Image (cartoon, grey):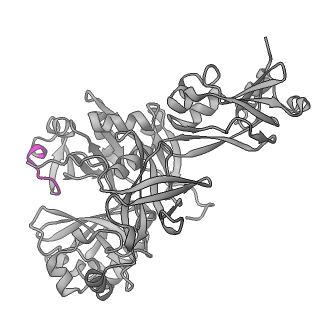
Amino acid sequence: MPADQPLKQTPLNALHRELGAKMVPFAGYDMPVQYPLGILKEHLHTRAAAGVFDVSHMGQLRIKGADAAKRLEELVPGDLQALKTGRMRYSMFTDERAGILDDLMVTRFDDHLFVVVNAACKDADTAHLHKHLGSAVEPLTDRALIALQGPTAAAVMARHAPEAAAMAFMSGAYIKVAGVPAFVTRSGYTGEDGYEISVANDAVEGLARKLLAEPGVQAIGLGARDSLRLEAGLCLYGHDIDATTTPVEAALTWAISKRRRAEGGFPGAAIVQKQLAQGTTKLRVGIRPEGRAPAREGTEIADASGTVIGKITSGGFGPSVNGPVAMGYVSAANTAIGTTVHALVRGQKLPARVAAMPFAPHRYHRG
Amino acid sequence: MPERKFSKDHEWIEVDGGVGTVGITDYAQGQLGDVVFVELPVVGKKVAKGDNAAVVESVKAASEVYTPVSGEVTAINQAIVDDPAKVNAEAEGGAWFFKLKLGNAGELSGLMDRAAYDAFLKTL
């Protein structure tokens, strides 16, 4: 992102400032990293009640046509044709070397797909989609996106959109929220139950204010969004996954169905198939430092003999875990849960273990 | 009452009988956010003015604490290691970081008094 370009704003910029947010540059946008409550309490609040997140910086697109699922499968390893209408799936764009260009959420409808991509990648993703799918691709630049996340999200949402209560996890629907036409999915990036709500730019502030006026609903910044997703074991593009990591190395093989593994037909498929059959030299794993010191992004990981075997890609303090949590890549011989490793922090060898993720249990709606 | 001095890196020091007590300012703790981890120097360590002497970490990031003057560490505050949230609650009170025997008392004259530090904060 060129430093000399002015930061873009979401339609909620004025509201963030009114709420006392500390604003930071993120993916070219002026975004709230935290509100006066602070990252720690915002994180805990989201796990205890409900939080509203402005994620309007993310890219939203429609891919039109009854054959959109089949066509998008040429760019991603996800099984989109198996999706029933109104159902949603996580996938990733891959390149010819099976590197991950971005990760995305796809909801299928009879005559189109609704796609959400990362803010930092949206221009490149849009160009990539246009190149391969042409005029079927419709960027939705006039739409904002907010997430409502937490154990009371469903009860809050039900007061403004009664249909939302019955929605299954990982499904999407065009419904009204507080009278506003919206595209709603039951999904999120926190490990909690919740929704992402896409509405017209000019409708989002009114909706956000209505949700924030509900008892127990707090505005939550990007800082807590990051610690929540890390505890949930979810990847952050550009950190845990990028063009130098494949879906197999990133331990995202759960997102590649049996049919797609067998048939291939996405960029880098031969490499993915080979890695599925023969394994990889590195793998993304969870890391739990044993002490209190966080091991942050870029921290080297060594085995018991001191040989460097990998690197932390996301790490910090998990407020719900009440201790340090991290994820990163280690060499294939060191991926077993419980393997003793060392995080090399400020010249010290801090003991840590390879750990199962999520660090905080997922509490998705299983209705 | 010993005078308290402040650095542009937002540390405070209070000197009594050739021994300085060092902490971070209330402004610094506010900028950091909730402190979740503190690492302090070992007693006996010799530090030079401006050295990284301690580490303080919030949920989001790690920050270094620089010693505002040179000297030898004579004591550390274990209470903030055991309960890092104390740094937020009483940064300029009980949540001091370490004490050091001054190596060069002349370095104190390069630091700000309270009024000068408050004026400095207004420029940030």
Q: Is residue A165 magenta?
A: yes
Which residue is at the far top?
B1
Res A355 quadrant in image? bottom left
**Residue A194 % position (x, y):** 22, 46
Near-viewer residue (A206 or A91): A91
Q: Quadrant of the N terminus of chain A?
A: bottom right
Near-viewer residue (B74 or A139): B74
Left/right of residue B42 with respect to residue A29 in the rendered view: right
Which residue is at the far front?
A305
Residue stretch in magenta: A164-170
**Residue B91 % position (x, y):** 61, 25
Q: What residue appears at the point 78 percent right and 41 percent down from the top-left corner?
A: B47
Does residue A121 sit above or below B100 in this rendering? Answer: below
Left/right of residue B45 with respect to residue B33 in the rendered view: right
Q: What residue appears at the point 50 percent right and 57 percent down from the top-left corner?
A: A343
Does residue A248 sit above or below A324 in this rendering? Answer: below
**Residue A68 % position (x, y):** 19, 76
Does residue A323 sit above or below B84 in this rendering? Answer: below
